[in-house]
Image (cartoon, rainbow, N blue to C red):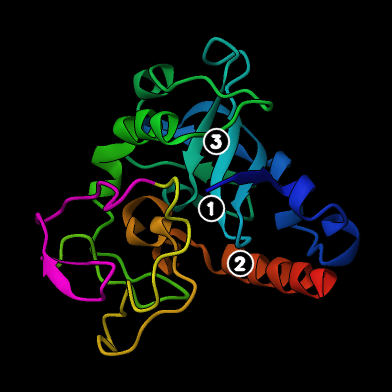
Amino acid sequence: MALHHLKDYYPSYRETVADGQMDKIDSYSVYAQGDDKVGTAKDLLVDDGGSFRYLVVDTGPWIFGKTVLLPIGLAQFDYSQTRIYVDGLSKSQVEHLPEYDDDMVVDQHYEEQVRSVYQPIAQGRSNRQFLGHNYIPSNSGYASTDSGVQTAAIPGDLRRMEPIEGHDRPAEGAYRTATHPDRPQQGATIYDQETGFYGLSEADNHGLLRSYEERLAAHHRRGQG
């Protein structure tokens, strides 16, 4: 599944649906555990469906000046202070993240490298209530197959059920919601199975981010119509 810079996917987002806060994502500082600043937000990456997937973080003088990716679900927003916190993340972990370049293609191998560093943090989010979708938690003991049948899964396993490439849109009924297991969730992506990394939750103050994502997606769909 291709990922796009926000400005490429929604070229006029600042002029059309800007809310005066989330559109200025590059004004946010990023902090690891112990209130240790590790960089500043630079951009957002969205998938083909318009969902936020990663924050692009410039580590500047704090960590070798490299740019890295942060799965959006792990970012805890403090809007009043324009800060993003990542609980459980150490400066050393950031140092070990693979470097990101604006011109590179984010493929499955690269994402697996990123996710391996964040795995312990994502594991701790597996029981959160997520906004927008009623996901089946990664540690629920069940996974969904392409036939829509739930099968036993490794408890707490946050690995991708299938590779991204060639599976950006699963078969109808591939994923089912926790509250309505008999009802297929339309338009789900492989990312949607990995709520530990990408799920937006109220506990992490993602309500405003979710609202912004929905407005941008609606505007993009109108522009494509």
Q: CA distance from mark 3 to mark 1?
A: 9 Å
**154 left or right, relative to 147:** left
Residue type at mark 1 is Phe
Q: Which residues are magenta?
A: 141-163
Q: Are marks 2 and 1 in contact (CB under 8 Å)?
A: yes
Quadrant hosting residue 129 = bottom left
Residue 16 x, y percent position in the rendering? 88, 65
Q: Residue beneath label 2, please?
A: 208
Q: Earlier in the sequence, mark 3 or mark 2?
A: 3
In the image, residue 183 sits, relative to residue 212, either above or below, namely below
The label shown at residue 181 is none
- Which residue is painted at 39% across and 30% down in the image? 109
Residue 201 x, y percent position in the rendering? 42, 65
Q: Main secondary structure of the magenta part?
A: loop
The label shown at residue 30 is 3
Quadrant position of the C terminus in the picture? bottom right
Residue 128 x, y percent position in the rendering? 29, 65
Q: Earlier in the sequence, mark 2 or mark 1?
A: 1
Q: Secondary structure at mark 1?
A: strand
**145 left or right, relative to 97:** left
Quadrant hosting residue 223 = bottom right
- Which residue is painted at 61% across and 67% down in the image? 208
